[in-house]
Amino acid sequence: MLRRATASLLMPALLAAALAGCFSDKNGEITDPSPDFVSCDTSAPAPPTDARLIRIRNFAFGPAQLSVPAGTTVYWINCDTDAHTTTSDTNVWGSSLLTQNAVFSRRFDNAGSFPYHCEPHDFMTASITVQ
Protein backbone atom coordinates (compact mmCIF):
# COMPACT_ATOMS: atom_id res chain seq x y z
CA MET A 1 0.00 0.00 0.00
CA LEU A 2 2.83 2.40 0.86
CA ARG A 3 4.53 1.77 -2.53
CA ARG A 4 1.32 2.57 -4.40
CA ALA A 5 0.86 5.80 -2.44
CA THR A 6 4.49 6.82 -3.04
CA ALA A 7 4.21 6.04 -6.75
CA SER A 8 1.02 8.09 -7.07
CA LEU A 9 2.75 11.05 -5.43
CA LEU A 10 5.80 10.80 -7.68
CA MET A 11 3.92 10.47 -10.98
CA PRO A 12 2.85 14.15 -11.24
CA ALA A 13 6.43 15.30 -10.52
CA LEU A 14 7.88 12.91 -13.09
CA LEU A 15 5.32 13.98 -15.70
CA ALA A 16 6.07 17.67 -15.07
CA ALA A 17 9.82 17.06 -15.45
CA ALA A 18 9.28 15.13 -18.69
CA LEU A 19 7.08 17.87 -20.13
CA ALA A 20 9.59 20.56 -19.14
CA GLY A 21 12.23 18.66 -21.10
CA CYS A 22 10.03 18.77 -24.19
CA PHE A 23 9.94 22.55 -24.13
CA SER A 24 13.57 23.48 -23.49
CA ASP A 25 17.00 22.60 -24.75
CA LYS A 26 20.15 21.79 -22.81
CA ASN A 27 20.74 25.47 -21.98
CA GLY A 28 17.19 26.22 -20.88
CA GLU A 29 16.08 28.23 -23.90
CA ILE A 30 12.42 27.85 -24.80
CA THR A 31 11.86 25.82 -27.95
CA ASP A 32 8.06 25.79 -28.04
CA PRO A 33 5.41 27.23 -27.97
CA SER A 34 6.25 30.21 -30.14
CA PRO A 35 4.56 33.53 -30.94
CA ASP A 36 2.40 34.01 -34.05
CA PHE A 37 5.15 35.78 -36.00
CA VAL A 38 7.38 32.68 -35.84
CA SER A 39 6.31 31.08 -39.09
CA CYS A 40 7.77 29.80 -42.34
CA ASP A 41 5.07 31.88 -44.04
CA THR A 42 6.69 35.16 -45.06
CA SER A 43 3.32 36.93 -44.80
CA ALA A 44 3.16 36.24 -41.04
CA PRO A 45 3.03 39.30 -38.75
CA ALA A 46 6.31 41.13 -38.19
CA PRO A 47 8.15 40.43 -34.93
CA PRO A 48 7.87 43.02 -32.14
CA THR A 49 10.82 45.36 -31.63
CA ASP A 50 12.37 43.12 -28.96
CA ALA A 51 12.41 40.00 -31.17
CA ARG A 52 13.87 38.82 -34.48
CA LEU A 53 13.15 35.81 -36.67
CA ILE A 54 15.65 33.68 -38.56
CA ARG A 55 14.22 31.18 -41.02
CA ILE A 56 16.23 28.08 -41.87
CA ARG A 57 15.46 27.41 -45.51
CA ASN A 58 17.31 25.69 -48.35
CA PHE A 59 20.18 24.76 -46.01
CA ALA A 60 20.82 28.37 -45.03
CA PHE A 61 20.05 30.73 -42.14
CA GLY A 62 18.15 33.79 -43.28
CA PRO A 63 19.29 36.37 -42.59
CA ALA A 64 22.84 35.06 -42.27
CA GLN A 65 24.06 38.29 -40.63
CA LEU A 66 21.81 39.86 -38.02
CA SER A 67 22.42 42.92 -35.81
CA VAL A 68 20.20 43.39 -32.77
CA PRO A 69 20.13 45.55 -29.65
CA ALA A 70 20.84 43.89 -26.30
CA GLY A 71 17.75 42.31 -24.79
CA THR A 72 16.47 40.94 -28.10
CA THR A 73 15.07 37.42 -28.34
CA VAL A 74 16.02 35.65 -31.56
CA TYR A 75 13.77 32.89 -32.85
CA TRP A 76 14.88 30.27 -35.36
CA ILE A 77 12.32 28.19 -37.27
CA ASN A 78 13.29 25.27 -39.47
CA CYS A 79 11.43 25.56 -42.78
CA ASP A 80 13.36 22.66 -44.38
CA THR A 81 12.32 19.01 -44.35
CA ASP A 82 15.83 18.08 -43.13
CA ALA A 83 16.62 18.57 -39.43
CA HIS A 84 19.02 21.38 -38.43
CA THR A 85 20.49 22.93 -35.30
CA THR A 86 21.52 26.40 -34.28
CA THR A 87 24.80 25.93 -32.45
CA SER A 88 27.09 28.65 -31.12
CA ASP A 89 30.69 28.40 -32.34
CA THR A 90 31.79 29.27 -28.79
CA ASN A 91 29.39 27.02 -26.84
CA VAL A 92 27.12 29.87 -25.72
CA TRP A 93 24.02 27.94 -26.86
CA GLY A 94 23.06 24.85 -28.77
CA SER A 95 19.65 23.69 -29.88
CA SER A 96 18.61 20.11 -30.27
CA LEU A 97 17.86 18.89 -33.80
CA LEU A 98 15.01 21.01 -35.13
CA THR A 99 12.63 19.10 -37.35
CA GLN A 100 10.47 20.87 -39.92
CA ASN A 101 8.55 23.80 -38.33
CA ALA A 102 10.31 23.33 -34.97
CA VAL A 103 11.37 26.50 -33.16
CA PHE A 104 14.29 27.47 -30.94
CA SER A 105 14.77 30.82 -29.23
CA ARG A 106 17.43 32.60 -27.22
CA ARG A 107 17.56 36.02 -25.60
CA PHE A 108 20.77 38.01 -26.23
CA ASP A 109 21.52 40.30 -23.29
CA ASN A 110 25.26 40.88 -23.76
CA ALA A 111 26.96 42.84 -26.52
CA GLY A 112 29.27 40.97 -28.85
CA SER A 113 29.55 38.90 -31.98
CA PHE A 114 28.01 35.43 -31.91
CA PRO A 115 28.89 33.21 -34.87
CA TYR A 116 26.95 29.96 -35.15
CA HIS A 117 26.41 26.96 -37.40
CA CYS A 118 24.31 23.85 -37.96
CA GLU A 119 25.84 20.74 -36.37
CA PRO A 120 24.92 18.21 -39.08
CA HIS A 121 25.63 20.69 -41.90
CA ASP A 122 28.73 22.63 -40.86
CA PHE A 123 28.71 24.60 -44.13
CA MET A 124 25.63 26.39 -42.79
CA THR A 125 27.05 29.38 -40.91
CA ALA A 126 25.72 32.72 -39.73
CA SER A 127 26.35 35.40 -37.12
CA ILE A 128 24.46 37.63 -34.71
CA THR A 129 25.92 40.93 -33.57
CA VAL A 130 24.48 42.35 -30.35
CA GLN A 131 24.98 46.07 -29.73
Image (cartoon, helix red, strand yellow):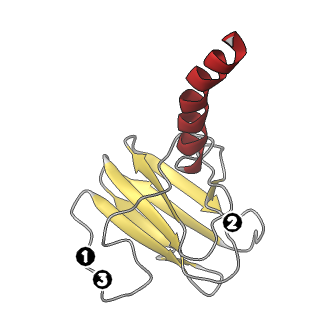
Q: Residue at x 63, y 42 (%)?
A: 26
Kindly give the residue lying farthest to the top in the view shown.
Answer: 2
Reply above or below: 103 against 114. Answer: below
Q: Amino acid at mark 2?
A: Cys
Q: Residue at x 37, y 41 (%)?
A: 109
The quadrant of the picture occupied by the N terminus is top right
Q: Amino acid at mark 1?
A: Ala
Q: Which residue is mark 3?
A: 44
Residue 75 in which image quadrant: bottom left
Q: Which residue is mark 1?
A: 46
Q: Which mark is residue 13?
A: none
Q: Residue at x 66, y 55 (%)?
A: 96
Q: Residue at x 65, y 45 (%)?
A: 90
Q: How many marks?
A: 3
Closest to the observer: 17 or 30? 17
| SS assignment at label 1 | loop
Q: Amino acid at mark 3?
A: Ala
The x, y position of residue 47, in whole percent, is 27, 69
User: Which numbered disc, 2 or 3, marks the residue closer to the eye?
Assistant: 3
Reply above or below: 11 against 37. Answer: above
The x, y position of residue 105, in whole percent, is 46, 56
| SS assignment at label 3 | loop
Q: Which residue is mark 2?
A: 118
Kindly give the residue lying farthest to the left in the view shown.
Answer: 49
